[in-house]
Amino acid sequence: MQSTNGSAAIDWDNARVFLAVARHGSLRAAGRALGLSQPTIGRRLAAFEAVFGGPALFDRLPEGLRLNAAGEALLPAAEELEDAALALERRHAAVSPVLSGTVRVSVGEWAARFLAGNLDRTSVTPLPSGITVELVESQETANLARREADLAVRHHPPEGGDLYIAKIGTFAAAVYRRTGADGDAWVTYTEEQAHYPTAQWVQQRLRAMGGSIALRASNMAMQLAAIRAGAGQGILPCFVGDADPLLERVVPPTPEIAADYWVIVHRDLRRAACVRAVIDWMQALFVREREALAGTRPLGVSPRRGRTRAPRRQIEDGAKG
């Protein structure tokens, strides 16, 4: 791209790659963050460097790429360009009436499993056929201002930022084991995840009543597999444990380990048609399955009197921010 005076103009896509490499420290990590291949990241970074006469903006080190003095000098201006470009992108999305495209949702593992398991049962408020939901499982809140995600579903809402926040539901949790199994062994999270409320609850139980840890695993899928195999007992959300015919509850749903969930969206995007449709679907789904989430019936099993149609709710209900 050329400017009107014949010099090379700044390409926002290339500037975005420069910022991603600066933040993530390698071409591979920047590619993962942007959804681009490593060769594409390399080409775009080279094109960005060429605009400034071709000097390298990064020192190539064994552990990755690090901004040098020339790169550091460009960083503030690139971030200002990013802020302006993303603000325009968000506002364009907010006024577009088109109900098609991809909506990227940053979500923790419990909510990710719940949402993914219900994408084919959307009779209450079905998603328009043109919308693709992209679930990105992460324990870290995505930077919604940078469009790392269009919205997030989190156990703890952030306290700052230009965000709209609304509670969408609560996941009850209980202790489960393989049916007929016995013993005081536990399946829980790793030491790095000892700050999780469920991991802390297990530690308190061990101190009070004794027992041992049979397995530490970093995600619920591995823990579930171990509990189903009879390795020990562990905490699961009720919608998972109650639906598994191999499992039984050891204790009723425990309020201390229930997890409230919140939907979080940047203010500029809260009325974007695609984002609004996904939020409406999630809110209706949480309403429809509230008994399964509370542990009073298995997920997907209709009440005796039939499933009731969930009311549409607006994100402003109970919103913060």
Image (spheres, helix red, strand yellow):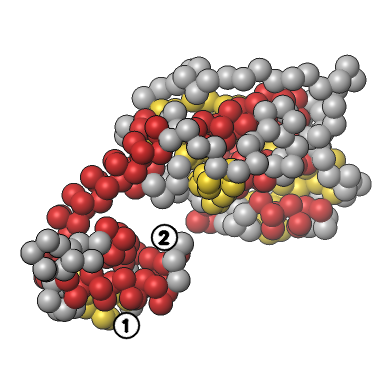
The residue drawn where x is 69% and y is 54% is 221
Residue type at numbered disc 2: Leu
Give the percent coordinates (x, y) of residue 7.
11, 68
Numbered label attached to residue 90? none
Tell me the quarter of the picture where residue 61 sits.
bottom left
Q: In this view, does 18 lie to the left or right of 188?
A: left
Give the percent coordinates (x, y) of residue 195.
50, 46
The residue drawn where x is 53% and y is 47% is 102
Q: Quadrant of the C terminus?
A: top left
Determine the secondary structure under disc 1.
loop
Q: In this view, does 300 lie to the left or right of 28?
A: right
- Graded by Cα atoms within 10 Å as few (under 14), some (14 to 19) or many (20 or more), the crowding at tag 1 reads few
Mark found first going from the N terminus, 2 or 1? 2
The residue drawn where x is 15% and y is 55% is 76
Give the percent coordinates (x, y) of residue 313.
58, 19
Give the percent coordinates (x, y) of residue 228.
81, 53
Tell me the quarter of the picture where residue 5 sits.
bottom left
In this rendering, the answer to whether 279 lies above or below 69 is above
Q: In this view, does 258 lie to the left or right of 59?
A: right
Determine the secondary structure under disc 2.
helix
Residue type at numbered disc 1: Pro
User: How far separated are the C-alphas under marks 2 and 1?
Assistant: 23 Å
Q: Which of 297/177 is in front?
A: 297
Q: Which of 188/63 is in front?
A: 63
Q: Name the residue under label 2.
A: 34
Observer able to see residue 172: no
Q: Which of 50/18 is in front?
A: 50
Q: Name the residue under label 1.
A: 62
